[in-house]
Image (spheres, rainbow, N blue to C red):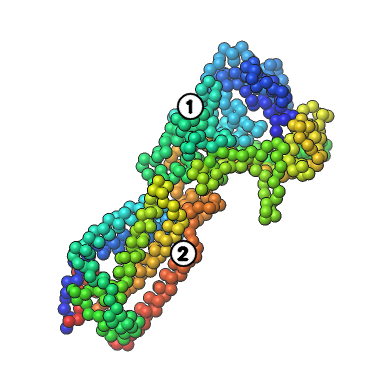
Amino acid sequence: MSPQSNWCRCTSCHAGYGWKDKKFDFTSQENIDCLVCHDSTGSYRKFPTACGHPAYEDKKFGGKDVKAVDLRRVARNIGPSSRTTCGRCHFYGGGGDGVKHGDLDSSLLKASKALDVHMDIKGLNYSCTICHVTKAHQISGRIYSRPAPNKHQLALPQDDGERLACESCHGLAPHKKEPLLNGHTDKVACQSCHIPFYARGGVFTKMWWDWSTAGKFTDDGQEIVKKDEYGNIVYHSMKGSMGWAREVEPEYYWYNGAMTYFREGDKIPGPHESGRSVALKINALKGDYADPRARIFPFKIMRGKQPYDPENRTLVIPYLFGKKGTGPYWGDYDWGKAAAVGMKEAGLPFSGKIDFIETEMYWPITHMVAPKDKALVCEACHSRNGRLASLRGFYLPGRDRWRGLDGSGWLALGITLMGIVLHAGLRFIGSRRRGGRA
Amino acid sequence: MKVKIYLYTRFERFWHWAQALLIIFLMLTGFEVHGSCRIFGYAAACRWHNLAGITLLGLSAFAVFWHLTTGQWRHYQPSFYNLRNIVGHYLIGIMRGERHPFHKSQERKLNPLQALSYLFLKVFLLPVQLLSGLLYYYYNDWVSWGVTARLDGVAYLHTAMAFALLLFLVVHVYLTTTGGTLLSYTRSMFTGWEEVED
């Protein structure tokens, strides 16, 4: 899935106007949508299929009325960005509330302390930009393809203002009452313990998205939309099967701040050496135990099935959104046609064959920081079958042991105790024979 | 005829019982940190284990000083005299109610088997356990110290010594019942006085 050939749908979430094809001019100031970030009325929103433009007149989308934006009112009420403006895109990425990120959804608009200690509206009430410090419209972020700057293990503001981290404010030894915990900060990211579960605000996040089942209709050709008991769409003719969850336990991996990405045209690696096929990683994490910059970090993993070209071994870029009859999947429901158009637009070869491959995408979990009394307890990881049970390659006290050693130790204890029982028994019998004297 | 002799001085008795309590506590907390049991909760077990370990290290420093300055270290000089008979006594003689072949005195209060096993405890088991524990405790400073040990290696050594100490403790406690009465040896470790055959 890619914006290519689907520009006007995807670019409704990008801070520009009129990104309708690959010729979009990123250097033109006229293309920048100031209002999407600086509206303070909460009424400005881009129309979902208008290439980044808002609705200038009353329109319909998905059968629902979308009123024209009152641009005069919005223009008179510009202000700093807010959770509402940032969240308009970042809470709804992937086509709905909480779909992409597991730790960003509309529940943060009115966050309680239990949901996020920093964004608690009755407490610190931070806006996004308190942490995502912005200078001249350059917004600080955390996750890029490059690791922490210079030779440092962690990103601190003095090293690189564009990358922020918990440590930027809290430092490397933030646990005053429990100094033992500070011994963890070199190998365990703050988020691993302090975000015990994500999607905690009530909104479900999408965990599974199987495109291979899309395109089924009722006998009379009607779209099928199935929902679960909470109202989450679990099947949609356009999108296939979906799985949702909330209060989700993250998965943990070594991560040094860098990722590699599977890009358009990249060859899909063959099946695993063992013969077992493994999911294709859309992004792969860098770092391991031996890497001094890597720490254990929590992730949401979006799993699913996506169409690919089994002959060229590339993911296909389907043309999803467009006029019926021109080949869009969401119109003609033919993956072959949709891929042919999309791959042509992307300038990539396409064999005409379509199959589906399981994919994984790693989403770092860094928001929804819980109050400290809700942080993970030691046993969550320091136990035989804790959260880090499958993260191998290093010794974790409480989890790991040398089975042979422990087994021999307990066996030796057992034999010793049996010997003692035998010895004491013989002593007892001997003393009885002698008339009770020791 | 039986006489009472003063074998264990006040410091020795304090040191023995403090060490006993610390070692038992270290085993409980240590095996919890190791994942073998759940008693105090991991955080408490870890914290108390470290504290008790440091305390035992401090106590051991005093004990070493005491042994050297009082000359008590001489009791631990290895001796193989009559060792065969002593082992035989524990295996067979004791069942028959025979007298212990070793004669305790203020000059030599430990029988050769005791002296050997306590020496092994003092110069090998405890030092290795205390030092590996200390190294484990300072795990976070290894990089700055230039230590290239592997945590699993240190942990395995510490675990192996823990099992050895556990076995020592079990056998040691059992053998305290082999005096005149089941509790007479224990009593003398509290009072310092022991009744011996003249």
Above or below — where is A257 with respect to B112? above
Name which residue lies at 30% across and 76% down: B113
Q: Crowdedness of circle 1 by 10 Å Cα count: few (<14), some, many (20+)?
A: few
Instruction: Give the chain letter at badge 1.
Output: A
Numbered-mark total: 2
Can the viewer see residue B9 in this picture? yes
Name which residue lies at 44% across and 54% down: B149
Picture coordinates of residue B46 (x, y %)? Answer: 39, 52
Above or below — where is B103 with respect to A399? below
SS state under label 1: helix
How many angstroms separate mark 1 from mark 2 (CA)? 51 Å
Can the viewer see residue A67 in this picture? no
Name which residue lies at 46% across and 64% down: A406
SS state under label 2: helix
Front residue of this view, candidates A358 and B36: A358
Name which residue lies at 42% across and 36% down: A171
Going by the image, does A218 lie left or right of A146? right
What is the quadrant of the N terminus of chain A in the image? top right
What is the quadrant of the C terminus of chain A in the image? bottom left
- Which quadrant of the view contains residue A44? top right
Instruction: Give the chain letter at badge 2.
Output: A
Instruction: Report which residue position mark 2 lands on.
Output: A406
First in sequence, mark 1 or 2: give its number: 1
Picture coordinates of residue A380 (x, y %)? Answer: 48, 49
Above or below — where is A53 with respect to A314? above
Picture coordinates of residue B44 (x, y %)? Answer: 38, 51
Q: Amino acid at mark 1?
A: Ile
Q: Amino acid at mark 2?
A: Asp
Q: Crowdedness of circle 2 by 10 Å Cα count: few (<14), some, many (20+)?
A: some
Instruction: Report which residue position mark 1 lands on.
Output: A130
